[in-house]
Image (spheres, grey):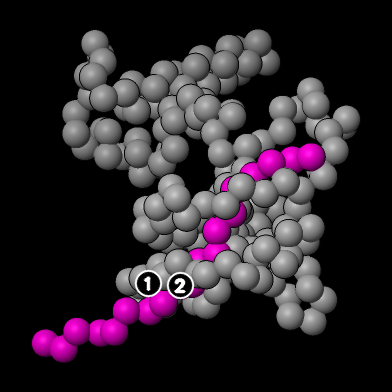
Amino acid sequence: MLRLVFLVTIFSVFLLIGYVMVGSLPGATITMSKLSKIQTVSIFPEGWAFFTKDPQEEDYLLFQADEQTGNFINVISPTSSPGNAFGLNRVSRLQSQELGSGIHHIRDSSWLDIKGDLTANTLLIRDMKPIAIPIRSQRPYFEGTYILQKIRPIPWAWAKSFNEKNRKSKICKIEFKKLPHKAG
């Protein structure tokens, strides 16, 4: 009996993975109805993209300067952190989505190359002119001035021996501004 339960469980997992794969692919030999695809995407929003993301793709980190200490506070905590209930709280996903909608307002020439962490570049950051990012949301997560950092992840094989002082990244200062409401 235990062997049968084990086989059924393994078969179900493979069937579920196959179903998600077929539902995520735009053109596949095996087709699904539109309703089935919508149901699959609503249950598994990442779909197969989770497994196909480039591990060297640059990350965007959003920081706010702490006036009292002079430190920079990471505003968006990782989804898997305890503060986000290990992924159950979706606030960080919504924050990332709001940030992502504003990133396209930043030109490539607006990014400044730095070496080391933000604290080592405090004087440079202070003198930067902020780029205005319009807020379209009624209840935005961000308002005011922030530092946006674009940084490549450190390969896991180098993580223990990597010196953070030598890490290169790009930064820009942004200011989220709420758009005036249109009458009518």
Q: Nearer the viewer, residue 148 or 96?
A: 148
Most extreme residue toward the right is 161
Residue at point 73% right, 59% down? 121
Q: Disc 1 residue type?
A: Ile
Q: Which residue is mark 1?
A: 135
Q: Position of residue 176 (x, y in %)?
A: 45, 72
Residue at point 35% right, 35% down? 40
Most extreme residue toward the bottom is 183
Which contiguous range is marked in magenta?
A: 166-184
Residue at point 21% right, 37% down? 35
Tag 2 or tag 1, which sits nearer the N-term?
Answer: 1
Question: How many other residues sit within 10 Å of disc 1, few (<14), some (14-19) or many (≥20)?
Answer: many
Q: Nearer the viewer, residue 178 or 174?
A: 174
Secondary structure category for the residue under label 2: strand
Report the side of 168 relative to 184 (left or right).
right
Q: Disc 2 residue type?
A: Phe
Q: Position of residue 63 (x, y in %)?
A: 64, 63
Q: Do the CB atoms of the residues marked 1 and 2 lie less than 8 Å apart?
A: yes
Q: Nearer the viewer, residue 127 or 90?
A: 127
Q: Nearer the viewer, residue 26 or 136?
A: 136
- Count every numbered label the image shows and give the total: 2
Q: Which residue is mark 2?
A: 176
Camera sees residue 79:
no
Report the side of 22 relative to 85 (left or right).
left
